[in-house]
Image (cartoon, rainbow, N blue to C red):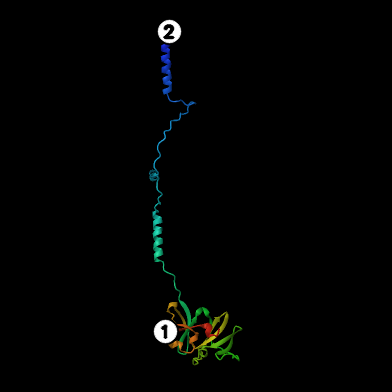
């Protein structure tokens, strides 16, 4: 009986030991989950990792943005190039020719008035006149250009121009008004005009409405 009891106890001890070793390890503290065993897996190839990542894509514009972009493109296509401003000139007659000067060089236009001769001056300087207490030299352009003297009557005018911050008057036969044209129609004076007296005082010529206008170089014309 003692031998059988001992064998029985030994068998129970072995059975209990086997049951203990097969049960999962319990957490040290109640309520905590025991960590599970980590099994290493082979790393995925770099190409597969890259292919799994989402590629950055540009978000399509909204309808309002698309319309704005379209209008912006159309405006850029339809936008005109830089505008070329017309020149504005004051035209007058000397003899049979039509001359003109830039309007921005003209101060005012005066009717004929008394001109006082000044001795020891060039023959084309008629003299001086007074304007609001200021002395104004007056030049006869016909004499300056070597042309025959024009008509001097009540329709003749003195055009006051500004040259290098100095006012001077030029005597002209007749005023014909303001004329406007684009700079690209101005051409060099042809040989027929270059051979005339006073050709060195010209800036060029322009034709508009079947009329020929001779542009003066005012600085040279008044001797500046």
Query: What is the quadrant of the N terminus in the image?
Result: top left
- Residue 198 numbered tag: none
Observer able to see residue 194? yes
Determine whether, in the image, residue 123 is placed left or right of residue 70.
right
Vertical order, 4 against 177 (above or below): above
| Nearest the eye: 56 or 42 | 42
The residue drawn where x is 43% and y is 19% is: 17
The residue drawn where x is 43% and y is 87% is: 191
Q: Which of the 4 quarters of the picture holds residue 125?
A: bottom right
The residue drawn where x is 52% and y is 80% is: 105
| Nearest the eye: 45 or 203 | 45
Observer able to see residue 109? no
- Residue 2 numbered tag: 2
Q: Could you tell me which secondary element the residue under label 1 belongs to?
A: strand
Q: Position of residue 86 (x, y in %)?
A: 45, 76
- How packed mark 2 is, by other alpha carbons closer than 10 Å (few <14, some 14-19, many 20 or more), is few
- Mark 1 vs mark 2: in front: 2
Residue that numbered label 1 is attached to = 211
How many marks overall? 2
Taking the view exactly as shown, the residue that stands out farthest to the top is 1
Q: Position of residue 81 (x, y in %)?
A: 42, 69
Taking the view exactly as shown, the residue that stands out farthest to the front is 3
Q: Could you tell me which secondary element the residue under label 2 belongs to?
A: helix
Q: Position of residue 71 (x, y in %)?
A: 40, 61
């Amino acid at each position: 009986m003692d031998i059988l009891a001992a064998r029985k106890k030994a068998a129970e001890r072995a059975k209990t030991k086997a049951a203990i070793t097969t049960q999962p390890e319990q957490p040290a503290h109640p309520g905590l989950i025991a960590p599970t065993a980590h099994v290493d897996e082979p790393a995925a190839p770099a190409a597969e990792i890259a292919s799994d990542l989402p590629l950055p894509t540009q978000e399509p514009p909204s309808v309002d943005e698309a319309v704005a972009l379209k209008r912006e493109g159309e405006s850029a296509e339809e936008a005109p190039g830089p505008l070329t401003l017309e020149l504005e000139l004051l035209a007058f007659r000397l003899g049979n020719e039509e001359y003109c000067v830039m309007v921005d060089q003209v101060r005012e236009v005066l009717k004929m008035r008394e001109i006082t001769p000044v001795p020891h001056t060039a023959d084309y300087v008629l003299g001086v006149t007074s304007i609001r207490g200021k002395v104004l030299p007056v030049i006869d352009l016909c004499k300056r250009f070597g042309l025959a003297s024009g008509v001097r009557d009540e329709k003749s005018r003195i055009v006051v121009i500004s040259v290098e911050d100095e006012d001077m008057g030029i005597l002209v036969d007749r005023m014909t008004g303001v004329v406007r044209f684009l700079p690209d129609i101005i051409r060099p004076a042809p040989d027929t005009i270059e051979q005339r007296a006073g050709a060195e005082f010209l800036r060029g010529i322009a034709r508009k409405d079947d009329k020929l206008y001779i542009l003066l170089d005012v600085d040279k014309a008044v001797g500046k």
